[in-house]
Image (tube, rainbow, N blue to C red):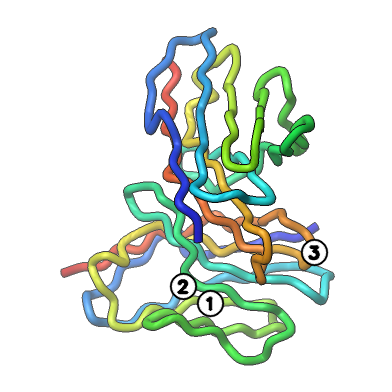
Amino acid sequence: AQTVTQSQPEMSVQEAETVTLSCTYDTSENNYYLFWYKQPPSRQMILVIRQEAYKQQNATENRFSVNFQKAAKSFSLKISDSQLGDTAMYFCAFMTSGTYKYIFGTGTRLKVLA
Amino acid sequence: SAVISQKPSRDICQRGTSLTIQCQVDSQVTMMFWYRQQPGQSLTLIATANQGSEATYESGFVIDKFPISRPNLTFSTLTVSNMSPEDSSIYLCSVRKAGAIYNEQFFGPGTRLTVL
């Protein structure tokens, strides 16, 4: 069975600084997708970034980028130039290709400090 | 993406009663899902809402407790039946659109349910 582990329950970062959120996963599958979702206090889950396992190039979306290490089964999220609006719970998620079921991690609560 | 609305946004209910939560999408979608997020925890999939047929429930969730309807491609309801305080959670619907390259899902704003 697949599992997703986020080992940092809470983190904080100063505004404009860079922060990295960790995520590791366990699977025997070779084809899968990985995602980072953001859930601000408003509760709306927002897709931040996604990565296909077969792509070696790390995904980037503006200030958000990932460090995908397939052999190590690691998928960390880097937020550059942190903004107050980045304050949220961040969930790492795994999905086997050809399926629709997410496996979510337990989340990391990020607080950006002014 | 998709614009998803849920009603109600929050409710406080008495033990033993039932609440129906609505999920409306601004466009036709292939798949709709219902999740539960218990306080301080991650999301757990309750069921997949199938258009024109019974929902597909995950282990630990049953139709009698969480009946689901999906009368068309843009709308679904989840009922939480015979509620107890343990049902206090945020309930979220999500959708997957046809042609979604990464199979990603888009989530509604959630319904915060408190059972007294």
Q: Residues within 10 Å of mark 3 (few under 14, many from 20)?
A: few
- Residue with the mark numbered 3: A98
Where is residue A69 drawn, in percent x and y?
A: 65, 85
Where is residue A17 drawn, in percent x and y?
A: 27, 82
Q: Residue at x 65, y 66 (%)?
A: B100
In the rendered image, the vertical position of residue B1 relative to residue B20, given as above or below: below
Where is residue A106 drawn, in percent x and y?
A: 54, 54
Q: Quadrant of the C terminus of chain B?
A: top left
Do the CB atoms of the residues marked 1 and 2 lie less than 8 Å apart?
Answer: yes
Of the image marks 3 and 1, the number of the one nearer the N terminus: 1
In the rendered image, the vertical position of residue B25 relative to residue A8, given as above or below: above
Q: Secondary structure at mark 2?
A: strand
Which chain is indicated by disc 1? A
- Residue with the mark numbered 1: A76
In the visual, does B65 lie left or right of A92? Answer: right
The mark lying in front, picked from 3 and 1, is 3
Q: Label 2 amino acid?
A: Leu
Q: Are marks 1 and 2 on the same chain?
A: yes
In the rendered image, the vertical position of residue A7 relative to residue B74, given as above or below: below
Where is residue B38 drawn, in percent x and y?
A: 51, 37
Q: CA distance from mark 3 to mark 2?
A: 27 Å
- Quarter occupied by residue A88: bottom left
Q: Secondary structure at mark 3?
A: loop
**Residue ranking furthest to the top:** B16
Of the image marks 1 and 2, the number of the one nearer the N terminus: 2
The mark lying in front, picked from 3 and 2, is 3
Which chain is indicated by disc 2? A
